Amino acid sequence: MTDRIRIDLGERGYDVLLGPGALRAARHHPALSGARRHAVLADANVLRLHRSRVADVLDGPGLAGPPIEIPEGERAKSFATLEQVLGQMLDLELERGDAVLAIGGGVTGDLAGLAAALYKRGMDVIQVPTTLLAMADSSVGGKTAINMPQGKNLIGTFHQPSLVIADFGFLDTLPERERQAGFAEIVKAALIGDRDFFERLEKSGRDGLTAAQLQAHLKTAITFKAGIVAADEREAGQRALLNLGHTFGHALESEAGGALLHGEAVAAGLALAFDYSARLGLCPEKDAARVRAYLELAGLRTRLPDLPGAPFSATAMLDRMRHDKKNSGGHIRLVLAHGIGNAFIHDQADAADLLNFLKDQIQ
């Protein structure tokens, strides 16, 4: 059964179709109908593994040409790849009334979304996430970006999709490591503002990643995010809460040089955010310990010396955090927590204390 979740943004609102068979359910959706053409921007690995499934989503909409392949990995989120993709889109003579079909994980979705936002000052994009992480987070909310040497996602814009199709069939070939990494974004939603949801996750244990429970957990997480995005589309206020764990996580991911998956970095970042909150006396230590214990139970490592890419440098991590896009007034801005399900924005982190905290965590 396919779930439908509405992202309520008025005229820019859209549906998220979620579950087994979501591709079939989307065939007659208004976003895919009409006479306009669709340019397919697809992850090269997804095309190789799911050619017949990709053909399903292409069965109906008029195609502008063969799929434009996006290389695997974070290195594809660059100006060089963006320029190449835009050039291929121009060669297809796409018009503003046409649309982009973005088929792949977070890298493809971010890059394709930004390309759609820039092409002739904007055209529609339909997100078809193929990883659990992209389904839970990056495909919903309209954030698009590429990376810079100074950090992740520093160049981008907000460009909402016209439809999101999260078909569970794509998860069949997803490696277990990537499934676990994607699960971190589901846990994040509970930690931000839904203590009851976190308790349900705890009760499900490692079974939370099985098909029997995953759809319900994912629906809860997306519905939670939809409410925040609807209230604060461009991250002027409370939407920044969705970055819980990400300031620490992005620093780890950048320093790991590709050895660490985004979701793995977020999981470690969630544990760090709760531990730092406890260090400051803002969060009960038992909640921080509970968060770390559940993430470890879900197969997500949280101790910095145990992460791929270790050992890390506290000084280098802090420097990465100084360049985080959420910072304001020259101060490091963190999302911390008063407890499970009670996150808040901490605007002026003390850099010296943060450095000492990171040194303690790295030992």
Image (tube, rainbow, N blue to C red):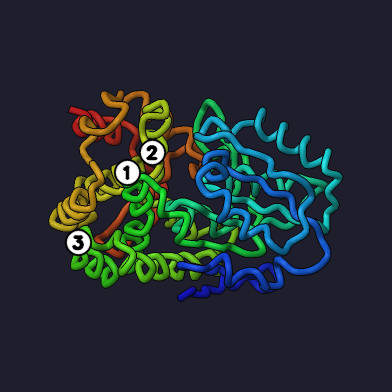
The residue wearing badge 1 is 177
Q: Nearer the viewer, residue 245 or 297?
A: 297
The residue wearing badge 2 is 261
On screen, residue 213 versus residue 158, left or right, reads left
Quadrant for the C terminus in the image = top left
Tell me which label, 3 or 2, sits earlier in the chain: 3
The residue wearing badge 3 is 205
Real-space CA distance between mark 3 and mark 2, rounded to the nearest whole angstrom = 22 Å
Residue 71: give x, y in percent of width and height. Answer: 57, 34
Tell me which label, 1 or 2, sits earlier in the chain: 1
Which residue: 37% across, 24% down? 316
Q: Residues within 10 Å of mark 3 (few under 14, many from 20)?
A: some
Which residue: 42% across, 45% down? 333
Which residue type carries mark 3? Gly
| Local SS, label 3 | helix
Q: Nearer the viewer, residue 215 or 228?
A: 215
Q: Is residue 336 above or below residue 265?
A: below
Which residue type carries mark 1? Arg
Quadrant for the N terminus in the image = bottom left
Whether label 1 touches label 2, CB < 8 Å? yes
Residue 324: give x, y in percent of width and height. Answer: 48, 38
